[in-house]
Amino acid sequence: MKFLLLLLFSAMNVVTLSAQKLTVIVTDIEADKGVLMVGVCNNEKDFPDTFFRGEKVKITGETMTVTFSDLPQGVYAVAVYQDENENERLDKTPAGIPKEKYGFSNDQKIPNYKKSTFTFDKDTTVNIKLTSIKHSNSDENSTKNGNNSY
């Protein structure tokens, strides 16, 4: 009988843990341009290119909310980019400068896993404001000609 009660209690804890949600609110989106790629990363090696969990969402406004359900407890970082041409990659100049808007958890402007991480042990909301790096065609042309200085 004690074994059955312990088993039932354990099962209830699993259900409670799996019900946690991570809500990602993304702002400063260029409305109606492509899709939003939202990724939850759980290790430094893969950040920000490979997602533990990811969502591709059609953009419908300047602010969007993406919810991840049944996410296990852990330490995560979130990476987001606005895939304007829907090619499922963050387009960059030859110098590696992003051409599309992007953002990371904890208001990070560069991909730094340790600075972007947060502990997920209960329902959590992460706010990410997309940013972009201004570059000109002359920057791209100078890079193509071998001049990488800015």
Image (cartoon, rainbow, N blue to C red):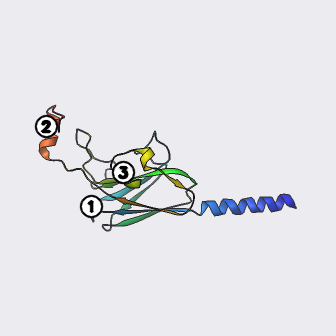
Specify the label residue 108 is tagged with.
Answer: 3
Which numbered disc flags the more N-terminal residue, 3 or 2? 3
* Label 2 Cα crowd, 10 Å radius (few <14 / some 14-19 / many 20+): some
Circle 3 packing at 10 Å, graded few (<14), some (14-19), many (20+), is: some
- Counting residues from the start of the chain, the first of labels 2 and 1 encountered is 1
Residue 144: image location, x then y, percent: 16, 35
N-term-proximal mark, 3 vs 1: 1
Q: CA distance from mark 3 to mark 2?
A: 28 Å
Q: Secondary structure at mark 2?
A: helix
Q: Which mark is residue 142?
A: 2
Q: How far apart are labels 3 and 1 at the CA level?
A: 23 Å
Q: Is residue 11 left or right of residue 2?
A: left
- Helix, strand or loop for disc 3: loop
Report x, y in % for residue 54.
Answer: 45, 54
Which residue corresponds to the image point at 56% horizontal and 59% vertical from the top-left? Answer: 70
| Quarter of the N terminus within the rendering | bottom right
Q: Nearer the viewer, residue 46 or 119?
A: 119
- Locate residue 92: give its quadrant: top left
Q: Please tell me whether mark 3 or mark 2 is closer to you in this view.
A: 3
Residue at far right of view: 1
Rendering coords of residue 24 (x, y %)? 43, 61
- Residue at image position (39%, 44%) is 112
Residue 33 is labelled as 1
Horizontally, is 47 left or right of 100 in the view? Answer: right
